[in-house]
Amino acid sequence: MAIVRTRRQAGGIVFRWEGDAPSVLIVSAARNPKRWVLPKGSVRRFERAAYAALREVEEEAGVVGRIVAPASVVEHATGNGRVRLEYFLIEHLRDVKPKEKRRVQWCPVEDAIQLLSYGSARKSLLDANPQIVRYARKRQPHEG
């Protein structure tokens, strides 16, 4: 029986408050800039998935964030093994210069779901939406 190698990846479902609703971050894919994806990448040896998610969001999108909660786990087969991708819900704190040259877009959750190129990313965002709304409402600046 062959041993199936599982690669670990981590990514972020990054949100911020804009107007009266939260917006989420999507980035262009590295291999095909016409595709939109959630920021993600490989977990380094001895690195925790949560730290990898924060690192990837900063490298790909130039966003420093704070993890609010785990969001979802996606597993799928590839040509050379399996991938286990852990998404984390990340609150935007500030922008920095990204290390990668990608297009970055902030948009309402509904728009991001339409723009994302992969079903697994759409499902992860859709599943995280209630949590985003709940958390964003708590953090919304109050008037008066």
Image (cartoon, grey):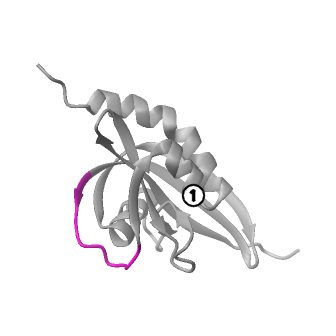
The rendered magenta stretch, by its main secondary structure, is classed as loop
Q: Nearer the viewer, residue 8 or 103?
A: 103
Image coordinates for residue 8, horizontal then vertical, percent: 57, 66
Please provide the residue range marked out in magenta: 93-102
| Residue occupying the point 48% across, 74% down | 45
Is residue 70 visible in this depiction of the protein? yes
Across and down, in percent, residue 94 comes to 22, 56
Q: Quadrant of the N terminus?
A: bottom right
Residue 89 visible in image: no
Residue 126 position, x and y percent, is: 57, 41
- Residue closest to the far top: 144
Corner quadrant of residue 18: top left
Where residue 128 appears, as percent x and y from the top left, is 52, 40
State which quadrant residue 108 falls in: top left
Q: Residue at x 30, y 67 (%)?
A: 62
Residue topped by disc 1: 116
